[in-house]
Image (cartoon, grey):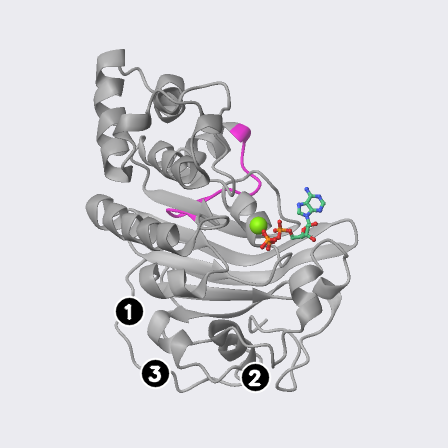
Amino acid sequence: MASWRQSQTVIGPATRQMPVAAPREEPAGDAIISIRNVTKSFGSHTVLRDVTFDVPRGKTTAIMGPSGTGKSVMLKVIIGLLKPEQGQILVDGEPIVGVRDKDVFRIRRKFGVLFQDGALFGSMSLYDNIAFPMREHTSKTEREIRGVVLQKAELVGLVDHLSKLPGEVSGGMRKRAGLARALVLEPKIILFDEPDSGLDPVRVAYLDDLVNTAQHETGATFFVITHNIQSVMRTADYMGLLFRSRLVAFGSKASMSSSGDPIVRQFLAGQAEGPIGMDEMAESGDGQGAARPVVTAGAPGATGA
Ligand SMILES: Nc1ncnc2c1ncn2[C@@H]1O[C@H](COP(=O)(O)OP(=O)(O)OP(=O)(O)O)[C@@H](O)[C@H]1O
Ligand SMILES: [Mg+2]
C-alpha cells in the first residue's frame, strides 16, 4: 500500500531544490490512488511530465490548472483509458499501467466517473441513464435497480424528472443525473471532470453542497478537476495545481492557501499579474506551452524530479 507522502509540503519551483520546513499538519492517512512519475505525450507534445502525487483515501482532492494543462488527460490515465509512456498508477495498491485489459476493467469498476459534459445517453430517460451501470455490471433485479435509482435521484434532487430525456432538462440537471449515475455502483472513488462548467454560480454552490453531502454519506474518495477556486475552497481537503505539464504544487487546502509559490498564489487569487500569462488560458492544443520551462522563482519544473 502506498503511503501518503506529500500531505505536509507544497512542492513548487521555489522549494524543490532543498528539503522544506513544511507546516505541521495531521497526516491524511493512506493513499487510494498513487500517481508515480507519470509522463504522457501525444506525438511531440508532452502533456504530463513526471507527475507524482498521492490521492488520500476518503477525502476530496481537487486538481486545478489552466486549460490544456492535461487535467482531463490525467483523469483518463488514472482510469486506464490512456496509457502513459512512463510511470505507474496504483489504485488501492494495484498497478493499472501495463496490466491485462481484464485487470484494467476490474480496477476501473472501483471508479464512478462524471465526465465533463455529464456524458448521458441522449436517447435514454434520466431514469435509464442512472440505471444503466447496474443493468450492465450487476445482476440486480429491476425492482432492486428501481430502489437504488430513486435513492440516488432523491440525493441529487431529480425524482420528479426521471422520465425526461437529457435534451429536455437543464445543464445543471444533466450534471446531477451524471452524478447520480456515478454513484449507483457505490464506487470507492468518484472522479469529476469539471462538474461545474456551464453552471450558474447558484447551481455551482448547490452542486458543491451535493458533493459534500455525497462525500460524507458515502465516505468515498472524491477527485475533482475544476477551474473554480470558490468550489475548491468549499469542497476540497487537498489540492494540486498543474501548470505547463508539471504538477507545480500539491498539498492540503491550508498549506496551499498559505503557499508562497507565485504560481499557486496567482491561480488561487485569480489574478492577472504573475507567472501565468493570458495565453496560458487559451493555448490548449498548440503544443508549445507545455514544453516551455516554468519561468518563475528561478527553477524549471516542480515535482522534485
Ligand atoms: N487524444 C488526444 N490526442 C492528442 N492530443 C490530445 C488528446 N487528448 C488531449 N490532447 C491534448 O492534450 C492537452 C491537454 O488536454 P486536456 O484535455 O487534458 O486539457 P485540460 O487541462 O483538461 O483542459 P480544459 O481545462 O480546457 O478541459 C491538450 O493540448 C489536448 O489537445
Ligand atoms: Mg478538461
Structural crowding at the residue carrying mark 1, measured as other residues with C-alpha within 10 Å and reported as few (<14), some (14–19) or many (≥20): few
Percent x, y of residue 277: 67, 73
In which image quadrant can residue 137 be found?
Answer: top left
Query: Which residue is disc 3 drawn over?
Result: 23
Percent x, y of residue 161: 32, 27
Q: Which residues are magenta?
A: 91-101
Asked if residue 127 lies left or right of residue 167, the reply is: left
- Amino acid tagged 1: Pro
| Label 2 secondary element | loop
Asked if residue 124 lies left or right of residue 41, the reply is: left
In the image, which disc is placed on residue 27? 1
Q: Nearer the viewer, mark 3 or mark 2?
A: 3
In the image, which disc is placed on residue 17? 2
In which image quadrant can residue 144 be found?
Answer: top left
Disc 3 from disc 2: Cα separation: 17 Å
Tell whether position 245 is magenta. Answer: no
Instruction: Tell me: residue 126, above or below residue 11.
Output: above
Q: Main secondary structure of the magenta part?
A: loop
N-terminal of the pair, mark 3 or mark 2, is 2
Q: Nearer the viewer, mark 3 or mark 1?
A: 3
Q: Quadrant of the C terminus?
A: bottom right
In the image, which disc is placed on residue 35? none
| Label 1 secondary element | loop
Tell whether position 100 is magenta. Answer: yes
Structural crowding at the residue carrying mark 2, measured as other residues with C-alpha within 10 Å and reported as few (<14), some (14–19) or many (≥20): few
